[in-house]
Amino acid sequence: MTESSDFSRQFDREYDLHGRVTIATQLSILFYPSFGILDAVIAPEWLGPFLLVRLAVVISNVAVLAVLHFNKTQQVARYCGMAVMILDALGIALMVQLLGGFMSSYYQGFTLIIICMLAVLPWGARETLIVSAVIFLSYIVPSVWAIDRGVLQWRVVVNNTFFLGSIIAVCVIASHLMYNVRCRALRVRTRLEETAKELEQSNQRLVSLDELKTQFFANVNHELRTPLTLLLAPLGAMLHGTGVALSTQMREHLTAMQRNGLKLLKLINDLLDLTKLEEGKTRIRVSPFDLVAFCRNIVEAVRPLAVERRVALRLDCSATEIEVFGDTEQLDKVVLNLLSNALKFTPAGGEVRVVVAKSADGPRVEVRDNGEGIPEGMLKIIFDRFAQVDGSKSRRHDGTGIGLSLVKEIVELHGGQVWADSKLGEGASFIVQFQAGEAHIADEVRERRSRNREVAVDRREGACETEKLRDVVRGIPSLQLAGFERRGREPASSISGTDANTRVHEHTLLVIDDNPDVLQLMRFLLQDEYNIVTESSAESGLALVRNEVADLVISDVMMPGMDGHELCKRIKESEETRQIPVILVTARAGPEGITQGIDSGADDYLPKPFDPPELLARVRSLLRMRKAEADLVRLNRNLKARADDLVDRQRSLFLSTVRCLISALEAKDQYTRNHSVRVTEYAMALARRMNFGERDLRDLELAALLHDVGKIGVPETVLHKPGKLTSEEFALIKMHSAKGAEIVQQISEIGAVAPAVRAHHERYDGTGYPDGLRKVDIPIGARVMAVADTYDAMTSDRPYRQGLSHSAAMKEIVRHSGGQFDPEVVESFLALEDWFRTTRNSENCALPLTSA
């Protein structure tokens, strides 16, 4: 395996090559002379020389050990390790040769060296192969050279050689595999260490960012609370003070401002509370309180809101007093958040019930409603941060998804539990389970500082301004419930407060939003210039648009049911309403929202908060554009009508001219006089029966009038010959259809009818002239003219015969259906039999009468 120099050095350091070589050297110094005992037993005659050999090897190893002590580089350690193994092997090789070479059993000492090398030294295949090769050669070469000196047993020679070679081969392969395993393990450890280091750095960055986030939230909380207090305090003074006279409209606007200011403050408080809980910095002031009285006060504070929403709110208590230890200010948020959820998702006429009881596990508060319920899959995640049952654009209820997560964090901070139980369509129950006593509340979450004042649970109407400001910063029920949607404050539909059919101004605007405060604001901003119709849902707004109520639509994007984008698509896909301008207003700004709005067909896109003058400017601009488009459409309609009238008059004049020319050409022959006019009348009747379009009818009328114009090139002697025509004369007659097409084609205004003129003598079975066309290859106009032309020719007198009766001509045409004539045209001809009979015998039809 080829490794980079950096990795090799790292490998040697990781597996301590220097230390392992030092250990191998020390083992050699220790055990090499101890095998003198074996020499005394196996070869006592060679004991002296063998001791000298062993002493020499030990002295050499001591020298290597000294080198290792003074030079601790990994490269020197690698060479020293190889030197120790080779020195030990050379000593054994010398003793093997003194004992007879191949026949000596001392060669097994090589096996010990190889096993030690494999077990102690973390070498790869290269170093192992070099040392093993030296060992093998030190045994084979001298033994082969000394073969003639003694008697050999070849079986022993082969056995010893094969055994030593096999051990060397296994050792090299094992060394290679072990080296690869060590390399892979080192790479994995290196990657793990690098990953751990990166994770540690990332964690430190996240901790720093988290600290910055906490500091940011604290700063934002301070920066937002100050201006909000400066806004809400004067609003409260104006609304509740006795020295300020407010009009009804101004009071409504100030109330909406206060309500939405409190809603924003509540959101700020919730975000700050959530941040503190995440950081573990929230502390609770634990004190005993009566859970029954606590819940009763909150229920009474919320009851006016429940009445406003037409929801029954009840409190059930199993005991008159239940003691609980906890922080009432924090637990306010728990009960109020659960009540706000229950009231929010309970429709008008529903019921919310607060049950306070003492169970075997401890005090319990349960908030039940009979609203729409929660899907089973959401019950496990409903308390997760930012989780919402419906987080889509068209959701029915407002919310950020942090209320229930705050509930869970606060309850668990008190050592309690909270869970939800629900069936979709049958309402939901939220249960808060407390523990008895206070021993279960951890010391690290307790607030050790003394409380300067008690938290007031009772919220009285008409409190002084100081109390109102204290409410703003302490999170009382009026603030906790500030995010509630109000019902019944906005009429479903009105125009500036008057009847929907009353038009005070020239233009009517339809404003659609599910927030009554926004509808009230839009009316206030726009009612001086426009009639204002308001709707709280896209479905009802679309119905008004289809009833032609609005000249312009202003719609919110995020609404329950159908959202603003879908409403815009519905308006723009209808031919009757697509010209109505649509402005989409949304709190979700950014290029994605604008792109989606434009893709849905919106004429303009306005992000919240918007500037009132900008809104008015955009409305005026779109209405001016709509008026200009309407004027342009009206002008185009008038121009088109005039152009159509001129075209019709031009065509009438042209047809009159053609009729005059055709009449002049046919006047020379009393037998064919008005033939083209009659063929035109017959052909047009058949074409109308066959539902020809207007353009096809106009082309057929021209083609029928001009179908025999080519006869101008046939000599009059042939045309007026009273007797039977010769074949040459008939050939001249047959050329008139092609000649007529050539004449017509030269006139650009009527060149399109040339194919029908050329083919009016073609036969359905392909035996006609001049081109032998058949069936649908023959233009449909030519197939119609063939029947009309033949009927008129058969019922008209000629110099060489008398005309047939209508009945005889009809039978002849039917007989040739599918051969000479198109069966579909013949079918229409039969359907018009009475008309043809009446028309033929009419005095208005310029036709020489024959006897029936």
Image (tube, rainbow, N blue to C red):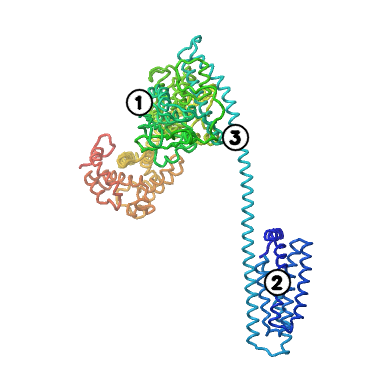
Residue found at x 23% / y 48%: 811
The image shows a total of numbered marks equal to: 3
Circle 1 residue: 312
Rendered view: 830 above or below 216: below
Q: Does residue 572 show up?
A: no
Rendered view: 319 above or below 178: above
> Which quadrant of the view contains residue 421?
top left
In the displayed structure image, the side of residue 78 where residue 482 appears, left or right: left
- How far is disc 3 from disc 2 in space, using C-alphas? 67 Å
Q: Secondary structure at mark 1?
A: strand
What x and y, as percent, mark residue 385?
49, 37
Q: Which is more N-terminal, label 3 or label 1? A: 3
Residue found at x 46% / y 15%: 462
Placement of the C terminus among the 4 image quadrants: top left
Q: Amino acid at mark 1?
A: Ala
Placement of the N terminus among the 4 image quadrants: bottom right
Residue found at x 32% / y 45%: 784
